[in-house]
Image (cartoon, rainbow, N blue to C red):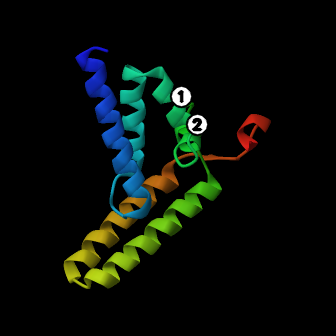
Amino acid sequence: MNVKRLLFMIAGFLLLGVAFIGIFVPGVPRTGSIIGASFFFSRSSKRLEAWLERTYFFGPFLRHYRYGEGIPTSLKVFSISLMWVGMIISMWIVNETWMYVFLTSLGLIITAHILTIRAKVLSLTLKERG
């Protein structure tokens, strides 16, 4: 394996770690990290790229994004709800005015972005259903 492929693979795993943390921590960029990890895996290992597309947490999102199909409305609602719950908990824990302003602003921007993504009616094939 050459050095460039190894560095791309490492970058892919680092971004995948950031995306995983982003599931639980508001404000951590999950979407960009998943897309970045997919990019680096596609340049380093087709096997890792295919694995990432099959993962439970990231696979459906990547497939919908990659093929321009939009995001299912249920995923939009779930993402926005989970994000706001996490942000409100963070605001309550930190209890600082700057945190209220920062997270509220960030939440509104992310919510607006998610709402502007085309909605997709979810229809799974037999293979995707398990």
Q: Quadrant of residue 45?
A: top left
Q: Quadrant of residue 83?
A: bottom left
Circle 1 SS class: helix
Question: Which residue occupies 46% across, 29% down?
Answer: 48
Q: On the image, numbered disc 1 is attached to which residue? A: 50
Q: How much space separates mark 2 and mark 1, taking CA atoms? A: 6 Å
Reply above or below: 51 against 96: above
Which one is in front, 95 or 73? 95
Question: Amino acid under label 1?
Answer: Ala
**Horizontal and vertical percent for residue 94?**
26, 81
Viewer can see residue 126:
yes
Residue 105's disc number: none
**Horizontal and vertical percent for residue 128?**
71, 39
Circle 2 SS class: helix
Question: Amino acid under label 2?
Answer: Arg
Q: Are marks 2 and 1 in contact (CB under 8 Å)?
A: yes
Question: Which residue occupies 74% across, 42% down?
Answer: 130
Reply above or below: 38 against 61: above
Left or right side of 54 for 33: left
Reply above or below: 45 against 87: above
Which one is in front, 117 or 32? 32
User: How many other residues sit within 10 Å of disc 2, few (<14), some (14-19) or many (≥20)?
Assistant: some
Reply above or below: 8 against 97: above
User: How many other residues sit within 10 Å of disc 1, few (<14), some (14-19) or many (≥20)?
Assistant: some
Question: Which residue occupies 55% across, 42% down?
Answer: 55
**Horizontal and vertical percent for residue 98?**
20, 77
Left or right side of 12 for 71: right
**Horizontal and vertical percent for residue 42?**
42, 24
Residue 54's disc number: 2
* Residue furthest top in the image: 2
